[in-house]
Image (tube, grey):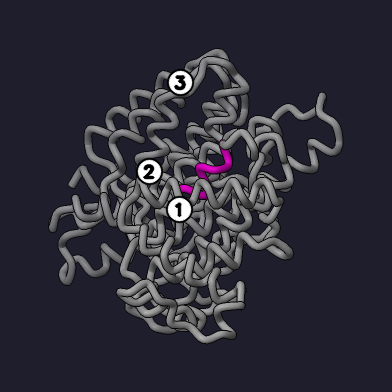
């Protein structure tokens, strides 16, 4: 069965097939062709997409048939071409195809699927293919699908954190499952089109963080990877809340509160993870540079896989970040007469002191920050190329109240007797960022 858009016109509507008298108006060749009638069925099923409950019941029955017949394989199964064509039909009828994706991802929790690991991988691969073909459109269905995949990501990370007691076969399957879930999340993030809902989901996940060490690390690792994935998505929700005086997007208050809580939890690796999340959310370009929309030569699709190296955390990008911020500050001083909205320093002495501080920061944070396998279970080995893209140095802003809370929290964190060396480096990195952002508030 072909899934091309041209195939849609090959199946006439039911009204053309059966007239008012109940007579069938098809050629003898089509009447004996199973492919013809299968397309007619798909057309009729796609018409049901106008009502969520009905289409859910129809799709669940179809999915169970694929389960029983083991047809989920993207290469050899029937599920992918059928669902791709149904996706095209639903879109052709002017309906939202995201509901199809949402129902398919929820099918991963069906009892028939839970007992078949390979089928789970196949279903995720099918969902990834459908996500690639879906349109960019904010909807509750796509947000729900993204949330469900975040939950599966958390489960896979949990298994990878302590796999010493698992067999080699289970470890290999979990690795493949984790990779498939990660790729599906990347594709879904493209279709959400707005980082705001994903940031809200991250806050909800952190709200339920456990006091059990391994569970807390799992949660933070999943949220951290999600933050990396959505780094290249424009933050439309919080950008709309920005004012003319403060055009930058506001840091999400709910997520900020949950990160403050995670920064003072008992486990030292969880605390480091909370600082990583804060850095990536505050400055997404430190992970994935975003192309400027006003330059047609830079309108290239951002590769979500090119994130941080396995052995280098987000903190290792500080030197370049601080250097860029320092250049922007110097540029702002030279052009004060042209742009009075951005002010960083008042006097030449202050400028000298600040440049000295930035030099020390570059020296301190330019070294690579080694990350244990358990601390960051999901990263890729590729790094983002900046040859064709100029990253946005600051994507979000901190309010005065947030800065005060952060400074108070940093003080409490710094005197904790449970700190490890990596905790002090994480604290100092966050403290440096807070100082740089606070300098726009004092003048």
Q: In x, y percent, where is residue 165?
A: 82, 24
Mark 2 or mark 3, earlier in chain:
2
Q: Residue at x 56, y 82 (%)?
A: 30
Q: Is 433 or 161 nearer to us in this picture? A: 161
Does the stretch in magenta take in 365? Answer: no
Label 1–label 2 contact, CB within 8 A: yes
Q: In x, y percent, where is residue 353?
A: 37, 48
Above or below, 76 relative to 397: below
Q: Residues within 10 Å of mark 3 (few under 14, many from 20)?
A: some
Left or right of 282 in this view: 245: left
Magenta segment range? 101-109
The residue pinned by badge 1 equals 230
Q: Quadrant of residue 110?
A: top right
Q: Residue at x 31, y 58 (%)?
A: 50
Single out the residue that lies furthest toward the left.
Answer: 244
Q: Residues within 10 Å of mark 1 (few under 14, many from 20)?
A: many
Q: In x, y percent, where is residue 67?
A: 65, 47
Q: Residues within 10 Å of mark 2 (few under 14, many from 20)?
A: many
Mark 3 or mark 1, earlier in chain:
1
The residue pinned by badge 2 equals 199
Q: Is 177 or 158 nearer to us in this picture? A: 177
The residue pinned by badge 3 equals 264
Q: Which SS does the magenta portion mostly show?
A: helix
Helix, strand or loop at label 1? It is helix
Label 2–label 3 contact, CB within 8 A: no
Q: Is 41 or 437 nearer to us in this picture? A: 41
Above or below, 12 relative to 344: below
Q: In x, y percent, where is residue 168?
A: 86, 36
């Amino acid at each position: 069965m072909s899934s091309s858009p041209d195939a849609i016109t090959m199946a006439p509507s039911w009204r053309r097939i059966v007239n008012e008298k109940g007579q069938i108006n098809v050629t003898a060749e089509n009447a004996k062709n199973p492919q013809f009638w299968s397309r007619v069925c798909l057309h009729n099923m796609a018409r049901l997409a106008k009502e969520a409950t009905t289409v859910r019941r129809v799709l669940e029955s179809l999915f169970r048939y694929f389960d029983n017949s083991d047809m989920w394989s993207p290469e050899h199964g029937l599920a992918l071409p059928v669902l791709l064509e149904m996706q095209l039909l639903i879109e052709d009828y002017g309906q939202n195809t995201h509901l199809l994706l949402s129902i398919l991802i929820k099918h991963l929790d069906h009892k028939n699927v839970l007992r078949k690991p390979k089928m789970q991988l196949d279903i995720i691969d099918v969902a990834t293919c459908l996500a690639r073909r879906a349109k960019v459109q904010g909807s509750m269905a796509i947000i729900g699908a993204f949330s469900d995949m975040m939950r599966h990501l958390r489960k896979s990370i949990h298994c990878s954190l302590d796999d010493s007691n698992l067999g080699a076969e289970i470890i290999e399957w979990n690795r493949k499952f984790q990779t498939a879930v990660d790729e599906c999340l990347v594709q879904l993030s493209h279709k959400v089109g707005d980082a705001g809902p994903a940031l809200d989901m991250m806050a909800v996940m952190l709200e339920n963080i456990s006091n059990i060490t391994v569970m807390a690390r799992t949660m933070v690792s999943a949220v951290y990877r999600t933050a990396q994935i959505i780094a290249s998505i424009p933050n439309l929700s919080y950008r709309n809340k920005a004012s003319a005086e403060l055009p930058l997007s506001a840091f999400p208050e709910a997520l900020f509160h949950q990160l403050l809580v995670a920064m003072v939890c008992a486990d030292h690796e969880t605390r480091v993870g909370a600082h990583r999340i804060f850095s990536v959310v505050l400055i997404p370009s430190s992970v994935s540079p975003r192309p400027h929309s006003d330059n047609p030569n830079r309108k290239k699709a951002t590769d979500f896989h090119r994130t941080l190296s396995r052995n280098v955390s987000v903190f290792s990008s500080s030197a370049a970040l601080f250097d860029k911020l320092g250049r922007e500050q110097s540029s702002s001083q030279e052009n004060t007469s042209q742009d009075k909205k951005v002010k960083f320093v008042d006097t030449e002495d202050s400028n000298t002191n600040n440049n000295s501080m930035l030099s020390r920061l570059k020296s301190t944070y330019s070294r690579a920050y080694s990350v244990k396998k358990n601390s960051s279970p999901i990263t890729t080995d590729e790094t983002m190329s900046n040859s064709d893209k100029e990253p946005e140095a600051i994507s979000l802003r901190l309010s005065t109240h947030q800065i005060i809370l952060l400074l108070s929290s940093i003080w409490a964190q710094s005197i904790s007797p449970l700190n490890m060396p990596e905790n002090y480096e994480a604290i100092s990195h966050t403290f440096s960022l807070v100082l740089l952002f606070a300098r726009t508030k004092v003048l």
